[in-house]
Image (cartoon, grey):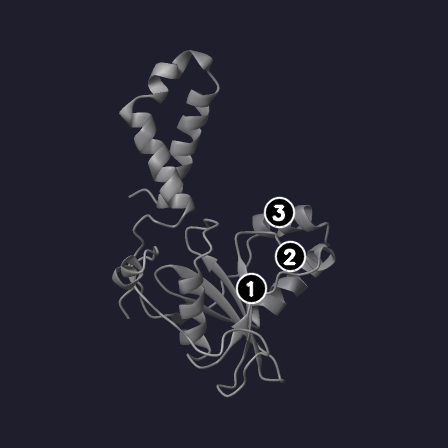
Amino acid sequence: MSSRRDLTGALAALLRLIDISDTVAAIRNGSVYKMARDVLDRADRGLIEQAPWTPFEERTHRPLTTAQIKAFMKQTDLSEAQVLAHFAEQTASKLFVNSRYQVLLRESGDNMVYLSIKRLDQTPIHDWRDLQRCKDELVGPECEAIELYPARSRLMDASNQYHLWAVADPKFRFPVGFQTGEYSGSKDADEVGASQRPIDPE
């Protein structure tokens, strides 16, 4: 069975082929083109149905292959020893996987927990609710975490991956954010003229 990534990649390639020709205006008005465009738009907005959420399971890290080591060396300009040292640091983290995400979890001595989160299909969909749920399940529902938008000089943007820093103390609160919470589904939002997707089942 093809993954959503394969499907959207194939559709994107098809649309690029159609877009490069000015002689296909009629095709652009056709139902196939519109349907393909709708699939891509919905994928970009995270609206394609996802796999049902499953509990996280801890996994063991797979060793790097020779090809992966060489690729990392080429991408990062690091030596083989440096790549292996970096990977050793990564494997010191706990690895958790569920039906949608892979999460590296690293604890530090000052009650901080770092979560490195990426989708299994490696798409660049940033789903706030999913990240919140990753934090809730792996750190704690009453623990707080932040996602940093850093200075350009220390920007980390090497893959479709998201980073959270949490405090493993349910009584700690960051000095920013709302003092009370509000959580609604699509029906509640409709009643006040807003738009919201349904709440995922727990």
Q: Secondary structure at mark 1?
A: strand
Q: Secondary structure at mark 3?
A: helix
Q: Nearer the viewer, residue 86 or 96?
A: 96
Q: Residue 185 sits in which quadrant?
A: bottom left
Q: CA distance from mark 1 to mark 2?
A: 9 Å
As drawn, which residue projects farthest toward the top? Answer: 23
Q: CA distance from mark 3 to mark 2?
A: 18 Å
Q: Residue at x 40, y 75 (%)?
A: 137
Q: Is residue 59 visible?
A: no
Q: Nearer the viewer, mark 1 or mark 3?
A: 1
Taking 168 as reference, is 97 above or below it?
above
Q: Which residue is mark 2?
A: 156
Q: How many marks?
A: 3
Q: x, y (%) of residue 79? A: 73, 54
Q: Residues within 10 Å of mark 1 (few under 14, many from 20)?
A: some
Mark 1–mark 2 CB contact (< 8 Å):
yes
Q: x, y (%) of residue 193? A: 32, 56
Image quadrant where one finds the C terminus: bottom left
**Disc 1 residue type (three-letter):** His
- Determine which of the numbered discs, if any, sits on residue 71 in the image: 3
Image quadrant where one finds the N terminus: top left
The answer to which of marks 1 and 3 sits earlier in the sequence is 3
The answer to which of marks 1 and 2 sits earlier in the sequence is 2
Q: Which residue is mark 1?
A: 163
**Disc 2 residue type (three-letter):** Met
Q: Residues within 10 Å of mark 3 (few under 14, many from 20)?
A: few
Taking 58 as reference, is 118 above or below it?
above
Q: Residues within 10 Å of mark 2 (few under 14, many from 20)?
A: few
Q: x, y (%) of residue 15? A: 41, 27
